[in-house]
Amino acid sequence: MSLLLALLMSYALGSIPAAYIAGQSRGIDLRKHGSGNLGATNVFRVLGWKIGSVVFAFDMAKGAVPVLFFAKWVDPAITANWPGDRDVLTGILCGVAAIVGHVRPMWLKFGKGGKGVATAGGVFLALAPLQTLLALAAFTVTVLASGYVSLASLVTAVLLPTLLLIRDGAWSPMFVVCAGIAAFVFWSHRANIERLRRGEEHRFGRRDVQRKPVVFLAIGAVVVIAIFVATRFA
């Protein structure tokens, strides 16, 4: 298979708008409800945790499948002269193509899709399982402690590149791409960041519960443990 075909297949798979399809199955256009975002978080908020969980898993699979399969089908002769680990480089390219598809899906006429967090998680789960699982643990603890999915996404966007930096160094392609994706996550969450600053961000759970000390302790503990584990297994 040519590299171009693998990238197009990755983009096409990433473009499948699971959140939009889930909404349409209930007669709802999620672009006009909740946050208006076609991501798993908005599905959780509008349609409930059961459908949200399915969409989240599918969005992660959209990132993992291109890395685990499409990248492996590329003709080795095409990448024979590439420096470094050719499988990793091909996987990164296919993964980025899937993320771009999720953010700007061709099936919705290249309109606005999701923010790419779950799909990026799938990409790096396939590329760096241990580091990604540690970052996902931090994501989960942050959501449970604070109720803010946006805050959890930002914590993960900082932690995962840090763990890859510890393992691979500053000049590794995986770290560089992950850092770039993390920067994009912060950019795409700029409205969320402003709402967090004003205390107006959407939150799961009871709004009257004061959880700030628990939030900082929980996030801090998980980040420290994650970095410790990453250094031990680097």
Image (cartoon, rainbow, N blue to C red):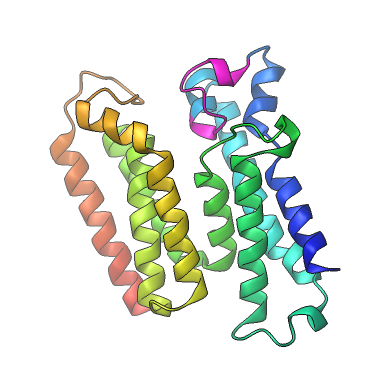
Residue 161, above or below 60: below
Q: In the image, residue 166 lies at what x, y percent?
A: 35, 75
| x then y, percent, for residue 60 | 59, 48
Position of residue 125 in the picture relative to residue 176 (left or right): right
Quarter of the view holding residue 214: top left
Tell me: residue 156, above or below residue 71.
above
Which residue, as the protein is rendered here, is positioned at the far right? 1
In the image, what residue occupies the spot 32% across and 76% down?
231
Q: Is residue 25 left or right of residue 199?
A: right
Residue 168 picture quarter: bottom left
Q: Position of residue 34 (x, y in %)?
A: 47, 18
Asked if the magenta segment contains residue 56, the reply would be no
- 230 in relation to 8, above or below: below
Residue in the image at 50% along x and 70% along y: 174
- The picture places residue 233, in percent across and down from the top left corner, at 39, 78
| Prevalent SS, magenta region | loop
Q: Is residue 193 left or right of residue 116?
A: left
Judging depth in this view, the residue of 202 and 230 nearest the camera is 202
Q: Residue at x 45, y 68 (%)?
A: 176
Q: Is residue 136 visible?
A: no
Q: Above or below — where is 198 with respect to 186?
A: above
Report the front residue among 141 and 127: 127
Q: Is residue 184 visible?
A: yes
Reply yes or no: does residue 31 show up in magenta.
yes
Numbered range of the magenta stretch = 29-41
Q: Quadrant of residue 151?
A: top left
